[in-house]
Amino acid sequence: MRYDSITEAIGNTPLVRIDPDVHGLRNIDLYAKLEMLNPFGSLKDRAAWNMVRAGLAGAAERGETIVELSSGNTAKALALIGGLHGLPFKSVTNRMRIPEVKDLLLLLGAEIEELPGQSECLDPTATDDPLTVFHQRLGRPGNAHLHTDQYFNPLNAEAHAQGTGPEIIADLDGRAPDWFIACVGTAGSSTGVASALRAHDPAVRVIGLVGEKSDFVPGIRTADEVQEVGLFDPAVYDAIETVSTGEALDGMVTLLRRCALLAGPTGGAAYLGALRHLRPLDAELTERRTAVFIVCDRAESYLGYVRARRPELFGRPAVKNSLTTLTAADLGQVTAIAVDEAQKWIGSGRPLVVDLRGPFAYAALHIDGSVNIVDELFDELVRNGMPFSTSRPVLLACPVGEKSARYAALLTRMGHPDVRSLAGGIVAWRDAGAPLVRD
Ligand SMILES: Cc1ncc(COP(=O)(O)O)c(C=O)c1O
């Protein structure tokens, strides 16, 4: 294999059969499409290259900067391609939650701008979200940006319609699989592959996997967030199912330890999501079928993410106090209070108000007198025991009241006598016109 440019090595990734002794399906051959073997490390290499390619000619002379709203793999691929073509790359995001990826981007020379956005993902209808404002500004003509626009750019899905999908068919000897299962981030890969597979065989069933609400699997959207993605069309999917962090990690560990596949969390999520969907169907089958799932990227960037959630895998004590250990009974114990009730309680009960949002969002607007402990840090504090005195009541607030409810359940289980969650979060507080202050 000899190339003039590393970008020629994008695509043509292997399709590897998972040993039936590992997955346990009797009538379905399950294959992993190893997108982590793309040269920059993920399936986003295809989209990044397809989106940026046409804009490269003359871009350096015009002094352009490649810009993308990405906190992960697309940013990595674009930073590398930018370097190859003498173009700077700037990543604009709400919050970079995986420090290894942030460090790698800095090492690649990327400029990173973290904005005080309200969600991880772009919501073009939220006109007051700084990320949205930035996105609109990028769309105006005459700026010096080569904006690849992954959430809206059809070239993202096209990369997979022309590459990933046809490769799967070719590797299955000219047949489309019966099921295709993929995690949904920008929706580019699932949309593109689905169109190629269905053009070949309309009977293909496509399963999209999203994260559970108030959970975080890096690279995919939650069920709510995905609605905000321009490329996302629910009609593409026969089913959209949720995967939890726990499932993603279980799947990842199986792929690492039993299949010799250096998969990251979304590869694990796709594997486990595939099995969960296919198991009941497998039992009914009388003839052989085929299913394909995507391994998007590699494990190494996520060591800190895994260690924080599964320290026992690293020879450390298991986490007792974490959101993943909550049961339905724990969640049933939560006291969530509406904005007007919370306002009265702050006046009379003087609770410690803890705002779990990111520091930028907090700095932009917060409840007067509240303290800011960003949720990742809060997570760590709670793991090590009760972070506050139990003699003072606590009101927890997050963007929409989901995460705070879960932490309220956890603190209650840990023995705090009076911890409450702000129902609807800071968004409800703001919408009710309750006072917010700015730093
Ligand atoms: C790690 C990871 N897995 C899966 C996906 C989903 O891919 P897509 O954006 O094509 O939906 C992404 C996308 O950002 C990702 O970074």
Image (cartoon, helix red, strand yellow):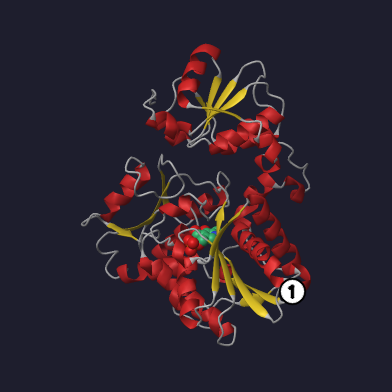
Front in this rendered view, residue 219 or 48: 219
* Label 1 crowd (10 A; few <14 / some 14-19 / many >=20): some
Task: Return the residue found at the far left.
Answer: 142
* Number of numbered markers: 1
Q: Which quarter of the figure is the C terminus placed in? A: top left
Front in this rendered view, residue 247 or 10: 247
- Asked if residue 95 lies left or right of residue 407, the reply is left
Task: Return the residue found at the far bottom.
Answer: 173
**Which quadrant of the figure has residue 256?**
bottom right
Q: Position of residue 237 (x, y in %)?
A: 50, 65
Q: Position of residue 100 (x, y in %)?
A: 57, 51
Residue found at x 50% / y 22% = 342
Q: Position of residue 386 (x, y in %)?
A: 69, 27
Q: Does the rendering let one see residue 85?
A: no
Q: Amino acid at mark 1?
A: Asp
Residue found at x 54% / y 69% = 206
Residue indicated by mark 1: 19
Q: Secondary structure at mark 1?
A: loop
Relative to 320, residue 301 above or below: below
Residue found at x 67% / y 59% = 252
Q: Is mark 1 within 8 Å of ligand 1?
A: no
Q: Does the rendering let one see residue 205?
A: yes
Task: Return the residue found at the far top.
Answer: 348
Residue found at x 48% / y 36% = 399
Relative to 315, residue 37 above or below: below
Q: Which quarter of the figure is the N terminus placed in? A: bottom right
